[in-house]
Image: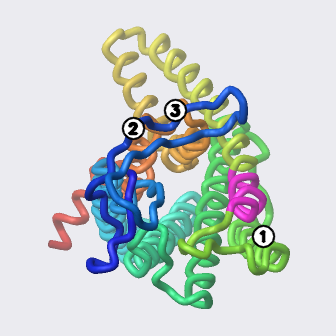
Amino acid sequence: MCSFWDEEKEDWSQDGCVLVSGITSSDERHEESVRCSCDHLTSFAVIMDIHRQEDSFIKAYNILTYIGCCISIFSLLVTLATYLWNKDLDLRTKQTSQIFICLCLTLLCLYTTFVVMISLDSIRDYREVRAGPCGLLTALVHYFVLSSIAWMGVEGFNTYLMIVKIFNTYIQNFMIKAFFAAWGIPALIVVLTGAIARDSYAHDDLCFLQSWAQVGGLLVPMAIILLINIVIFILVVRQLIRSANIAGRMKGEAKVERQEAIERVQNAICILLLLGLTWVTGYLLLIPLFSQVAQPIFVVLNSFQGFFIFLLYCVRKPHIRKKWGLTC
């Protein structure tokens, strides 16, 4: 926009000024240039859209994020209450259930902290929270993201032992080791990242990790766990398909084989969610070619992940539905 400073209005004005030519490339100086024409003399400037309206897509994503996170918080609370409250369902004593409960608890903390952060720091390009609280919120979100991914890694390893390895799967003090790995290591990474990055840990205009702190302290550790989980997912799905085919052949019925296959696919989708492979879409946001397509997928998959877990691990299970009926 070709503008001048209007002293009466105390604002930039375009009255009497027009844009003759937009940004072009100069062969001699190799730089971008703008040509303006005005019918008066004053202090002129080229302003790059100072009254930019927020993209409608960004507004939609923000609303979708709030809705998804709030639904996931409620869903995870119900899921945790179901697994912790009902003693006769034996949901608290099994190792798989304990891992699942820890994962749900960490996800609940992540969603809650994230909603608080985006509520306090809602204006883009302007940090509304002081440096101290902003750094604390950033550190908490950083920790709970890493911790939830770590518990997904524990879930993946446990699934591998149960479905793929089967024999000699007992590991002494497994849950104690899992607690240390999934809660202790993320805390160590957050402390080290904060100590190394210091002033460049959180953005000046946003309560989130700066670029290099984000790469070294978040994206790289996440990528390592997600790559391991992808390998485990492939091995588990292959084993599920193989066992479904064997079960179908033994029974010799096409209908039974089809039902077995459907159940195996449902289990694979559950495992996919528990292993956190929905986070892989986040890495596509780093590639400009895929970012526009990946952004809505990433928002939906990850903000509603708690709700998906609730549907698959509570609503889908008949014995839990029956217990809800008796409790109500």
Q: CA distance from mark 3 to mark 2?
A: 35 Å
On residue 20, which mark appears?
2
Camera-side mark, 3 or 2: 2
Question: From where the camera sits, is residue 61 visible?
Answer: yes
Q: CA distance from mark 1 to mark 3?
A: 29 Å
Badge 1 or badge 3: first in the primary sequence: 1
Pointer 2 local density, CA inside 10 Å: few below 14, some 14–19, many at least 20: few
At label 2, the amino acid type is Val
Residue 321, above or below 80: above
Residue 155: image x %, image y %? 62, 53
Badge 1 or badge 2: first in the primary sequence: 2
Instruction: Please state which of residues 310 and 264 is positioned toward the viewer in this rendering.
Output: 310
| Residue 257 position by quadrant | top left
Residue 105: image x %, image y %? 50, 72
Q: CA distance from mark 1 to mark 2?
A: 54 Å
Q: Which residue is mark 3?
A: 290
What residue span does the magenta drawing correspond to? 211-222
On residue 189, which mark appears?
1
Residue 245, above or below 11: above
Element type at mark 3: helix
Q: Is residue 86 left or right of residue 177?
A: left
Badge 3 or badge 2: first in the primary sequence: 2
Instruction: Please state which of residues 168 and 307 is positioned toward the viewer in this rendering.
Output: 307
